[in-house]
Image (tube, grey):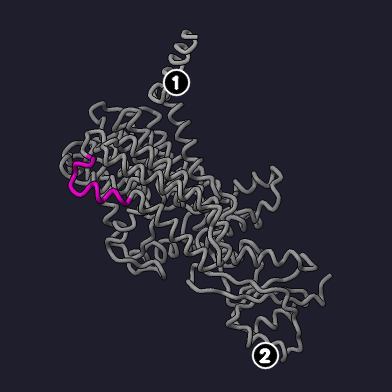
Amino acid sequence: MDGSVAQQSISMRRFSPAQLASFVERSHARLCAVLVLLSLACFLSGFTTLQPMDRDEPRYAQASKQMLESHDFVDVRFQDEARYKKPVGIYWMQSASVAIGDALGIPEAHTTIALYRVPSLFGAIATVLLTYWAALAFFGRRGAFLTAALMATCVILMVEARLAKTDAMLTACSVAVMGGLARAYLSRGAGVLPRRALIIFWTGFALGILVKGPLVLMFAGLTGAVLSYRERSTRWLLTLRPWLGLAFTLAVVLPWFVAIAVKSGGAFYSEAVGHDMLGKVGTAQKYHWAPPGFYLVAFFATFWPGAILAAIAAPFAWIHRREEPVAFALAWIVPSWLVFEAVPTKLPHYTMPLLPAVAILVVMAIARQFVGPHRPFAKLATVLIPFIPVGLTIGLSAANWSFDGTLPYRALPAMAAASAIALYAWWLFIGNRMVGCLWAGFLSAVCLAIGVFGFAQLDLRSLKVSDKLAQTLRGFPSAKASVGTLGYREPSLVFLVGTDLDMLDSAPEASAFLKKSGCATVFVDQRFEADFRIANERNGLAPALSTRVSGFNINSGKRVDIGVYSVDAGCP
């Protein structure tokens, strides 16, 4: 009996957390596997059930859908409008994802938004793994792992992993480039870079340009310029084999850029450069203006749970700014951050490619025991760790009650767990147990992702206006019916209903649309219904009001009430 107990004791010691951590840390592959599992835990909840999020996501998805419908993989269009704001890379990736889903027999693949999100999911996971790779230029395996885990669990990457846009993939490309640049700078005495680093660097550079134009060039260019000024030399950049790399980049990106120039007659460049890029620099685009300092304030939400630790670590970066690893991280962050703050057009995800460098500084400061309860105001400031999940729990509950008259009951257990674990992370910080604080933050982020994206968004039915409108068409007697919309013009409706959705501008136009089609449905916002009835009386029409859809339009910030009117006299 005693021998059996002793054997069990030895077995328990063998599989203690410390032993398990040591086992995992002995292999890059095992650490990366854990990072992938952590990423999936943060990114997958709600991935297939979250509605198309207006307005940017369905614009990207619809343009990719039209590529598949038209078999034109050069021109980028949203309905009849040319969409020349970004290069073609993300549209190709989304089209390929949907084509594979269609080949695998996924029903209604072309209107399944999750398939268009797959490149963003891969981009987010790649961001985490490439952050690990980039951080290996600064740390050993444990430090690189913690850096990558901070990225996997930060709020903004969790959001972008679920949206069919460019930003997760752009961040992955940017981290690939900056990881290669870090190796070139920090090992510049060696005179040569490993082939793997060169391949990752130039692949990230070329794909980054194909996904979002010059941004990846800005990140690398500003960093390289600052460090070259610091060194009073650009010779260290030669280890990146620039002429060979530029030839590779041109081979990847030039064919499409030439093809779109020929096809659009130069309209792509005037739209992408003149309107989109210079428009953001010169004047704030509609709804997206914010004052300087916006990103600094937003950072405490977007980089949660690591944001407040980064704030505590900020003096460390200043004190040690002359050290080469710290200098590189600062050159990665500061110039581009200042550009983003100076540009009038601001969105929270713009600074996401800079966050891996912030994570590197946080882990560096923790490793040197700079971050802890001994720092001025640190004990009070770290109340922000539980504040985000507690605030989201209260805020989403209030929104659900206001919009739908109920509470997100399915989400509350996970969100309460996220709040409790975040409170425990704060307690660990007070006890100066920094690694434990980080791990508690990671676990809290997983619970928060499950609560918010997995369950809370399901209960916010009032936000799913386009979904509900598209569902009303399933009961219409003819699948070939024409569909129009008056007053509600969100891109998600085009994506879900179809490319041929008519955007109607007036009540007489909507009535004429029904009379001409003879077999049609039109969605009419309540604001236009009185005029719509008058126009129908003049045209001798009596369309049937089949149902009403009400909800809340997050883009206009207003409630909507939409009547669904149909005529089926001319239906086959």
Q: Position of residue 344 (x, y in %)?
A: 32, 65
Residues at marks 2 and 1 touching, judged by CB atoms closer than 8 Å? no
Does the magenta stretch mainly form a helix, a strand or a loop? loop
Residue 15 - label: 1
Determine if the magenta segment contains residue 462: no
Q: Position of residue 410 (x, y in %)?
A: 56, 52
Q: Position of residue 131 (x, y in %)?
A: 38, 38
Three-letter amino acid code at the position of disc 1 = Phe
Instruction: Identify the element where label 2 is drawn.
Output: helix
Instruction: Determine which residue is flagged by label 2.
Output: 534
Q: Is residue 305 left or right of residue 374?
A: right
Q: Is residue 442 left or right of residue 112?
A: left
**Residue 410 visible in this rendered orientation of the protein:** yes
Disc nearest the viewer among 2 and 1: 1
Which residues make up the magenta segment? 371-384
Instruction: Identify the element where label 1 is drawn.
Output: loop
For this rendering, which residue is in front, 182 or 189?
Answer: 182
